[in-house]
Image: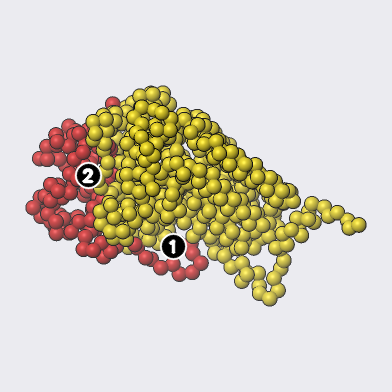
Chain colours: A yellow, B red
Amino acid sequence: MANKLNMRDRYKLMTRLGWETSYQPMDKVFPYDSYEGIKIKDWDAWEDPFRMTMDAYWKYQGEKEKKLYAIMDAFSQSNGHLNISDARYVNALKLFLQGVSPLEYQAHRGFARQGRHFTGEGARVACQMQSLDELRHVQTQIHGMSHFNKYFDGFHDFAHWHDRVWYLSVPKSFFDDANTAGPFEFMVAIGFSFEYVLTNLLFVPFMSGAAYNGDMSTVSFGFSAQSDEARHMTLGLEAIRFMLEQHEDNVPIVQRWIDKWLWRGYKVLSLVSAMMDYMLPESPMSWKEAWEVYFEQNGGALFNDLARYGITVPDYAEICTKEKEHLSHQVWGILYNHTAAAAIHTWMPDDAKMNWLSEKYPDTFDKYYRPRFEYWRDQAENGNRYYSQTLPLVCQTCQIPMGFTEPDDPTQISYRVSEYNGDKYHFCSDPCKAIFDFEPEKYCHAWMPPQQIFQGNCGGEGLPAVLEHYKFNLGADNMDYVGSPDEANWNLWKGLNGSVSGDVKAS
Amino acid sequence: MAVTAIGDYPVLPRDGVENFHGNQLVAVGWDHHLMIDAPMAFPLPAGMPFAALVGEVIPVAYSPHPEWEKIDWEAVTWTLDGEAFVPNMEASLEENGIGHKSVIRFVTPGLDGLWG
């Protein structure tokens, strides 16, 4: 009888990616992990954090998958969508499928690429394993939300939209930026900044939001992904520690990447802030509270830990502290302005929600936002719902319309500008400007949605041509929730006032 | 700083004025009036008179604001790309020094927007 291998030997047999090449020199086989300036003395110091669980990985993932799909099927068969708090909630899922799920796919591609390009075996195996996880995540999310696609608008062409629609260029350009960086920057961008530092600000709001609003299908895929996230966080932290421990010259490079990518991620999460505070009929916590717990407290502890390498909290943390009082309201205002060109619905909060916002934001909501929102609500109730008729100037780096205010003056838009090669470039903030100024070659050819529309690259002139190019079902995917087919269907299914006869879901 | 890249990294600006079919991009912001969420961008011919910008273009974006009707245009002050600026209403955008991707901002004394 053959001897049973120990865990370490089994792992070696299962991966078998580490050998010294002989036909070609190693630096020709792995040409991309040196140009970024990161110095590595000993690749063996990077151990694959998945090594001890590799054996069980396939079994556990298979079991998780079976359970997850059983729950999703049960949700579907029992018309689980009828048990959610309100149809407004579904817009959080639309935003997730349009904006976040395609990033899971991009993460799959990005980690697969790094899984090829790192010289070290441990780093390559870890990245390949994460690449598999990310592919599983996007698949389960698409499957989970396919049920909602049968009953609600705003789901049907999410992948097409991700590549074209203005507000989705925010997450898309974020990941394109990471995937066009070198392997080490990618690890700081996605492995560390996004998966380690910011992930809780993305997943907790969506998953606890789903739980609070009766969406057990989404809660299930959240839980299923969560056990993977723990491994991903371990990899992100290991990657950064490895870089910092290998050579002191790596420290300033890593610091600059942390500064860049926490800010890039923070700007993407501003969409989540609006989702949390406005789209969820039942809110587990406000954006401000989430920021305090998951960034200020948990992130603070992390930076204390990294201080021994010489890593510091980004200078702009103070801006985020001031902005936490404003971010969600400003982003909801931006989405509300441009809802005619969005595949989500927006609406003005009712009195109960406004009061909740006043309570959560006692220093800012009543003073800076309630008057605007009440004016909009009155206008809408009088049949004059405000929609912007024009296109905004958007930030060249984060690609969000320039609707953010000066850190010390919430009544004034923050304008920043750089000149490069004789042209002007506009930014919403000092950190977005600093990112551009460091690598203007990269951001001067960003695909800016308003500019692309004006250049005639989005279907033609005028909003209807652009929306056709987007493949929107006009009057169904876009516009206010009030008056939408989603609302009419919901009222019909739930027997609520204002219901109309017949199924009015757009084709 | 140069971009960190594997090799040569060509500079390919996507939004040069030559891509706008004879127009230039001009952005306009009304300070403190954030119901209109952001400065708005317009593709405009360089020969357009400033008066047409005020009379025909800006209203499309800003006239929904409840303070729009109350604006005293004689009292309005302007900035162009961050500098104080007195526009010549009859002159063209170009003659007023407004270039591609310029930002024009205006302030309406006494009208401060919707605040609590």
Q: Could you tell me the amino acid type at mark 2?
A: Ala
Crowd band around label 2 with a 10 angstrom C-alpha radius: few (<14), some (14–19), many (20+): many
Closer mark to the observer between disc 1 and disc 2: 2
Residue B61, position as x, y percentages in the image: 22, 44
> Between marks 1 and 2, how big is the CA–CA gap?
38 Å
Instruction: Please say whether residue B80 is visible from this viewpoint.
Output: yes
Instruction: Please say whether residue B81 is visible from this viewpoint.
Output: no
Disc number placed over residue B2 in the picture, else none: 1
Which quarter of the image is occupied by the N terminus of chain A?
bottom right
Q: Could you tell me the amino acid type at mark 1?
A: Ala
Q: Secondary structure at mark 1?
A: loop
Q: Chain of mark 2?
A: B
Quadrant of res A302:
top right
Q: Earlier in the sequence, mark 1 or mark 2?
A: 1
Is the residue A324 above or below the residue A155 in the image?
above
Residue A434, position as x, y percentages in the image: 41, 51
Out of B98 and A14, give the one closest to the viewer.
Answer: A14
Cβ–Cβ below 8 Å for labels 1 and 2? no
Mark 1 vs mark 2: same chain? Answer: yes
Q: Secondary structure at mark 2?
A: helix
Crowd band around label 1 with a 10 angstrom C-alpha radius: few (<14), some (14–19), many (20+): few
Taking the spot 63% from the left edge, 49% from the top edge, the residue there is A235
Taking the spot 34% from the left edge, 56% from the top edge, the residue there is A469
Q: Which residue is mark 2?
A: B61
Q: How many numbered marks does the figure carry? A: 2
Residue B6, position as x, y percentages in the image: 51, 67
